[in-house]
Image (spheres, helix red, strand yellow):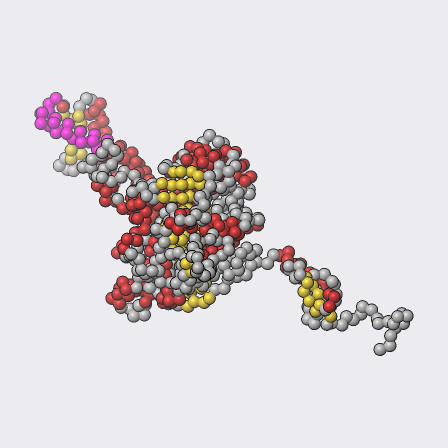
Amino acid sequence: MTVDEGHEAALDAQEASALEAEEAGKTGVVRRGEGGEWEDVEYDEDELSEEELAQMDELDALEGEDEMVMSDQLYVDDDTKLAQDMQDTMSAAETAKAAQEAYEQGDDEGEGGSSRIHPLTQENKYGPLPFTIQLPKAGFVDPASLLLSGIPPVHIAEAAHRVFGGVGLPYSTSTPAIGKTMQPKPIQLDAYQSGMSDIEADTYLATIFPGMYASVMSVLAETRRRLGTHWAENLVKKAEAGELKILDAGGAGAGVLAVREMLRAEWERMHEDDQSDAASVMALAEADGKAGGANASAPLGSATVLTGADTLRKRASQLLENTTFIPRLPDYLHTEEARFKGKYDIVIAPHTLWQLREDYTRKQHTQNLWSLLSTDGGVMVMLEKGVPRGFEMIAAAREMLLETRISSPEARAQNIDISDPPEPYVHWEGQEQAEPLTRPKEKGMIVAPCTNHAGCPAYVQKGHVRGRRDICHFEQRYIRPPFLQKVLNAKDKNHEDVKFSYLAVMRGRDLREVQDAKDGFAQQQVLEQGKPATEKAFEGYGGEARNRNTGDPAAARDGEEQSTPHSLSLPRAILPPLKRRGHVILDLCTPTGTLERWTVPKSFSKQAYRDARKSSWGDLWALGAKTRVLRTVRGPKSRKSDHDMDVTSSKKGRKGGKKNGGDDSGVGVDEHGRLKFGEGVSMGEGGKMRGRKIKGVRDKRDKKGRRAEE
């Protein structure tokens, strides 16, 4: 027998002895004898002393606690493991969300917690941060959901598909892919129209409001970035004093919501310290809702909203406070004094041009909006759908403002047009003086998206061009509210990218000139545009770009401090970057007013190369490039039917046919229906063709019908 077998046998004997002793009513104990064998010791508990009984009770209590701990440990381990798994899952989700936000913001960090992205790249990014817009829950989503709660979503969906062109709603603010195959049309419901049924007003609220709010908020965020903190703080101070005036000339209130959301964010930034003090335990709440002398809520400013229909006005009034609703815009264009002063600090005019059929009405509408704008630094925002026709509307309005209203160093005056309202002119008796043919322009500037005041390089072909390919437009992603999800019957995604072309201009201020301290822009450097600004931007700002070959960190820091450009002196990306292996291609609109393609290879600068890969559509670029080429605007697309007709006609012309598009030596019809002649063909007297001998038609004969001899 081995040692282990002997040990097991002894344990079995011990257990058997203890069991027999327990059955006999006694406590059995086994002890090892002198020879190493186990012996049974029988004793009666009554014969034990009190000390020995107390020791045995303590041992029994310890054994019971161990058993309880062992039994409870199974449950504790399971609960702990479940809680740990849930915590790990939540941490992973939060980490993924933070990583996504950091990627969208471009604020990823390197070693030591320092940001790897260049400060100039971060400062000149486009749009809001984070880029995806969340519609205000308390300001819009909840009230709108309550307004639409009494109407079945099926009815709203049917009305939306009927009014806005079917699946994808191509005739709303959306631009689905199916809309490219359809005839382009403006938004079929607008705030100007006076007749709008209840279901159409509900459809407008559910489908147009979200996209319009997102696009206006995107433009306001970009305007806030370019004009800086002083401009936004002045707006908040005006709102607190009750002097801020806002005009929504086409959004039915969506523009006012966006402006007030921007004011709220700026007010919270200005009062961060006050809010932290008010949140402390020692803060005292006053009866009027104020703490520490600061307003309990952000200022709203007084707003005016254009709504032609009573049904739409009733719904918009549930979303807005301190707002006046008007059925039509006041005419400041033909006033004597009001148009030289203006009234509103912010004018929002989304989707107001395409609905107007004639060019002259669009021109007068734009001039009237400019006249309504305050001359004390008022900002006007105009936007249309991001399609060729919408871009043409914005580009035409921009060209008209530059030619007739906004003063530039190269053009301080404008020629008076016969359609413009006459200026007050006094003719003194006895003095012969002709009426002036020119009129001085006003001080103003383009804020966004253009960084130049020259002609638009994408609008070389003026007016409506069928099949236009290159347009200046941008996009903004937003989270759809639940009621819009039901209208679209969307299940795969809950976001949408709205595309739009826009223009933001300022009246009464020009950052290209030296500003006074009272203007709020005195701390910023003078804006430089044109060819010098383009050359500097191509060379690159910041220590990394300018000193990429020196390798001197001190020189890099000095170069970065000395060369901080104004954001409106930089080129803007008009398309998403083309990421290739080892280099990135950027399509930029430069301060010179040209479209150029800049290449940023890895050999140029690691920082510039990395930031170029992280750049987005609409960003301003400050880190330079290695090479650049002029990018020409592509011509309009030719329709397949026209191309087929031209090919067929040319084939028939070569066979001697007399249809359109014959051979070059004959007669044909051009695209406008006018006659065209080939080489050597001209119109003689009486409309007869001369200059080419026609063979094979008839023989020359005399009066008697006999063939004449040659």
**In the foreground, 598 or 19:** 598
Rendered view: 112 above or below 214: below
Residue 74 appears in view? no
**In the foreground, 564 or 19:** 564
Residue 173 appears in view? yes
Which x, y percent locates residue 575?
45, 57
Q: Quadrant of the N terminus?
A: top left
Locate residue 424 relative to residue 699 in the image: left or right. left
Rendered view: 316 above or below 695: above
Which x, y percent locates residue 427?
44, 56
Q: Is residue 437 magenta?
A: no
Q: Residue at x 34, y 48 (%)?
A: 98
Quadrant of the image occupied by residue 452: bottom left
Which x, y percent locates residue 189?
51, 41
Q: Residue at the front extreme?
A: 430
**In the foreground, 166 or 686:** 686
Majority SS type along the magenta span: helix
Locate residue 399 relative to residue 162 in the image: left or right. left
Q: Quadrant of the C terminus?
A: bottom right
Quadrant of the image occupied by residue 85: top left
Q: Is residue 61 magenta?
A: yes
Q: Residue at x 72, y 61 (%)?
A: 659
**Magenta residues, start to end:** 46-68
Q: Residue at x 52, y 46 (%)?
A: 355
Q: Residue at x 20, y 22 (%)?
A: 24
**In the foreground, 161 or 432:** 432
Which x, y percent locates residue 585?
43, 62
Locate residue 282 relative to residue 640 in the image: left or right. left
